[in-house]
Image: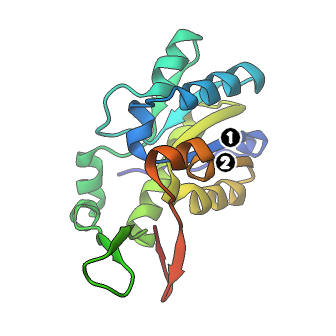
């Protein structure tokens, strides 16, 4: 897969990065995500809504962007793109499972591993797809496991980044419980 070199003028790009879980991206049972997206589109002069959305039904951000006549793109790689990049099998086999305390029968949550190589390839492609649009202000939604590494990649390319992890908000935690990102033995886990 050909990679787009980043044009020098992207240094003026501002990215408003929202981290969330993928279920909220399309379901939004309380309407909180809709409010946040609509508010950001009204108040931040957003030129583009970009979203990690492969495999999802129509998303909340996609619907709101359409309502206010803002362009929306899916920045994620398709399954075919992942196969061509040689990362599909590893992503499908991504380590995940129950999170146990000390009792093997007491599950307190689940864990999901961030894959630096494979997720890094995807995030680099997201950069390319955003920069191809030549927008000045981008509202970007992605899985919260990506928020810190993707923000770092954006900043390394000269973008200004404002990030918000929606999983830390009380209404999110009321719906889905607490999500945490931890480092364990050099691994980034959720």
CB contact under 8 Å: marks 1 and 2: yes
List the residue tagged with mark 1.
16
Estimate how packed mark 2 is, as few (under 14), some (14 to 19) or many (20 or more) residues with alpha carbons within 10 Å: some
* Whether residue 49 can be seen here: yes
Q: Measuring 52% from the left and 26% from the top, which residue is drawn there?
A: 31
Q: Is residue 47 left or right of residue 31?
A: right
Q: Measuring 40% from the left and 50% from the top, which residue is drawn there?
A: 2
The CA distance from mark 1 to mark 2 is 8 Å
Query: Sequence order check: which comes first, mark 1 or mark 2?
Result: 1
Q: Measuring 59% from the left and 40% from the top, which residue is drawn there?
A: 131
Residue 151 in the image: x percent, y percent? 64, 56
Residue 164: mark in rendering:
2
Q: Quick one: SS at disc 1?
A: strand
Residue 62: mark in rendering:
none
Q: State how the image is colored.
A: rainbow
Residue 49 in the image: x percent, y percent? 57, 29
Residue placed most toward the observer, 110 or 25: 110
Q: Measuring 63% from the left and 44% from the top, which residue is drawn there?
A: 17
Q: Quadrant of residue 150?
A: bottom right
Residue placed most toward the observer, 151 or 145: 145
């Amino acid at each position: 897969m050909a990679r787009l070199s980043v044009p020098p003028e992207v240094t003026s790009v501002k990215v408003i990065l929202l981290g969330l879980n993928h279920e909220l991206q399309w379901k939004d049972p309380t309407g909180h995500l809709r409010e946040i997206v609509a508010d950001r589109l009204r108040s931040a002069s957003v030129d583009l809504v970009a979203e990690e959305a492969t495999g999802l039904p129509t998303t909340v951000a996609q619907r709101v962007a359409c309502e206010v006549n803002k362009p929306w793109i899916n920045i994620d790689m398709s399954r075919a793109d992942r196969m061509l990049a040689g990362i599909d099998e590893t992503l499908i086999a991504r380590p995940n499972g129950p999170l146990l305390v000390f009792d093997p029968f007491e599950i307190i949550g689940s864990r999901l591993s961030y894959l630096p190589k494979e997720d890094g390839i995807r995030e680099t492609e997201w950069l390319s797809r955003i920069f191809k649009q030549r927008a000045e202000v981008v509202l970007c939604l992605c899985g919260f496991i990506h928020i810190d590494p993707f923000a770092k990649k954006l900043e390394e390319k000269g973008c200004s980044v404002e990030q918000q992890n929606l999983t830390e908000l009380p209404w999110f935690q009321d719906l889905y419980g607490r999500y945490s990102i931890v480092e364990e033995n050099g691994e980034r886990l959720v």
